[in-house]
Amino acid sequence: MLETRRICSFSEVNCAPSHSRAAGPKWWRKLHQTAVAKRFRYSRGGIPKILINPDAVAGAAQPPYELPNIHVEFVRVEPPVIPTSLWRGVGPTHNIFVVESFIDELAHTAKRDPVEYRKSLLAQNPRALGVLMLAAKKGDWGRPLPARWGRGVALQFAYGSFAAQVAEVEVGVDGQIRVHRIVCAIDCGMVVNPNTIAAQMEGGALFGLTAALYGEITLKKGRVVQSNFNDYRPMRMNEAPIVETHVVQSSEPPSGVGEVPTATVSPAVANAVFAATGKRIRKLPIKGLDAVR
């Protein structure tokens, strides 16, 4: 969970973040004695020796934007009895949702286009700006859509890569959400196999979309209610949107791909829901939320 409190001025596009707090289990403590952690701990640019659970604040502590002040805290909260572990995308999956949803709200408050607002905060970050504008161009940003349709955008820096997504969403009068199209742009450094990148972006986007729309585990009398895919719903084949991947050619060292799109898709879809309905999504999963009706 990431709680964000920020102070912003809107003379133009200035944003001065003041305080963000992430809360969750410190799964890194459970992992750090393993061979996996030891291997990464002493690798170049690997896990800090202080082991403060860097992944818990990933996506929040180092956003791609030029922000004059930023303060991020991590508060360890262990759920009683329930064991927790890793999930594809890990920390950025919740942090990027909060940060990019809030950036979108700032753009709306400043009466700025969401892409243009983000662009104005990226003067010192050409790689982030590159993926943002590529996704906007390929995603037909600004082209008119039918009523109750909307486009949303999200940008992130995680796993050493820069990525942006544009989601095209339709919201029915009954609140049902249909994601028609997701356009991904990624700068992951030097490209070794573009087909692998496309496969990871497509699979990761659908994995994250399942979580954003439906992913929920509930407990009753101390036991998990869901038992299989009949009551823990994944994306169905007939629901899957078109996913397009556009890769920035780069000579930078190769960086992460597999978990990147999982984190970007939820804020892109939530921001598209706002564009379609004027209603904000501040909680996931979206299913059953009265906010979209």
Image (cartoon, rainbow, N blue to C red):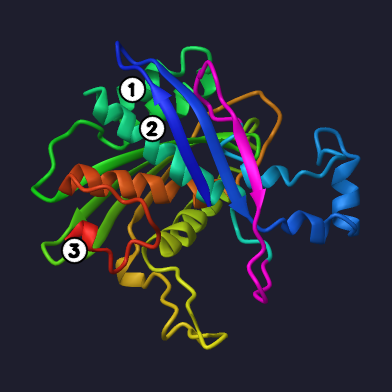
Please check the rendered image and state whether residue 172 is part of the magenta-colored stretch, yes or no: no
Separation of residues labelled 2 and 3 (CA atoms):
24 Å
**Place of residue 30 in the rendered image (x, y in percent of width and height, measured from the top left):** 80, 61
Position above or below: 210 against 90: below
Between discs 2 and 3, the one toward the N terminus: 2
- Can you see residue 150? yes
Residue 108 is drawn in which quadrant? top left
Quadrant of the frame with the C terminus: bottom left
Q: Residues within 10 Å of mark 1 (few under 14, many from 20)?
A: many
Residue 65, image x, y percentages: 49, 23
Report the residue at 35% width, 38% height from top: 153
Q: Is residue 25 left or right of residue 157?
A: right
What residue is disc 1 on?
Answer: 117
Q: Is residue 63 one of those drawn in magenta?
A: yes
Name the outermost residue toward the left.
Answer: 147
- Amino acid type indicated by mark 3: Gly
The amino acid beneath tag 1 is Tyr
Tell me, for residue 103, which label it has, or none.
2
**Magenta region's main secondary structure?**
loop
Q: Is residue 140 above or below residue 70?
A: below
The span picked out in magenta is: 62-84
Give the residue at x 34% y 16%.
13
Residue 204, x across and y down, in percent: 51, 55
Query: Could you tell me which secondary element the residue under label 1 belongs to?
Result: helix
Quickly name the residue at label 3: 175
Quick one: SS at disc 2? helix
Instruction: Estimate how packed mark 2 is, as few (under 14), some (14 to 19) or many (20 or more) residues with alpha carbons within 10 Å.
Output: some
